[in-house]
Image (spheres, helix red, strand yellow):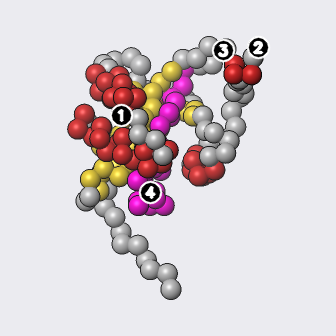
Amino acid sequence: MTQARAAETVAIRDLRQQDLPEVVRIDALQTGESKPDYWKRVFRDFLQAKGEPLRVGLCAEGADGLVGYLFGEVRAFEFGSDKCGWIFAVGVDPAHLRRSLATGLLALACRRFREAGIRQVRTMVGRNNVPVLSFFRANGFVGGSFVQLELDLEGEA
């Protein structure tokens, strides 16, 4: 017999410095690796930045505290790419998956990009990361006009 999940009330808001430990915790649950120094740099860049480029740092907060986050920014890339929004990190506490939290975070980030005059949003996902790939596809993301290429320098002589 399947037990129905209780409705969860969450608020989406801008990230604050005191959210750092929870972002580190959620990311470690998702990736299996704790990266506090990395996230300290991200928080410093996002929370101290003023003006250009537009940066979006959001979180979903429930009764038990922070349950999800999203980071994105406007970037202008080489190779003829126009300015666009980039989502470079999204995470949800595994105990709160499948409740549309990441979708809500993404919707607000896209609204902020749109309000800034941005017409496209991009991200990059590991081809074997099926849950994240499925999330972005379910939210309308498709293969873009650029192809990411890489060279393994470990194999170079």
Q: Amino acid at mark 1?
A: Pro
Residue 48 on image: x %, y %:
28, 22
Q: Is residue 100 magenta?
A: yes
Precedes in sequence: disc 3 or disc 2: 3
Q: Residue at x 29, y 41 (%)?
A: 21
Distance, label 3 to label 2, CA atoms, is 32 Å
Q: Which residue is mark 2?
A: 157
As drawn, the residue found furthest toward the left would be 18
- Give the secondary structure at mark 4: helix
Q: Which residue is mark 3?
A: 80
Q: Which residue is mark 1?
A: 36
Quadrant the C terminus occupies: top right
Crowd class of label 3 (few under 14; some 14 to 19; many from 20; radius 10 Å): few
As rendered, which of 34 and 66 lies closer to the eye?
A: 34
Distance, label 1 to label 4, CA atoms, is 19 Å
Q: Amino acid at mark 2?
A: Ala
Q: Residue at x 44, y 57 (%)?
A: 94
Residue 80 placement, left or right of 102: right
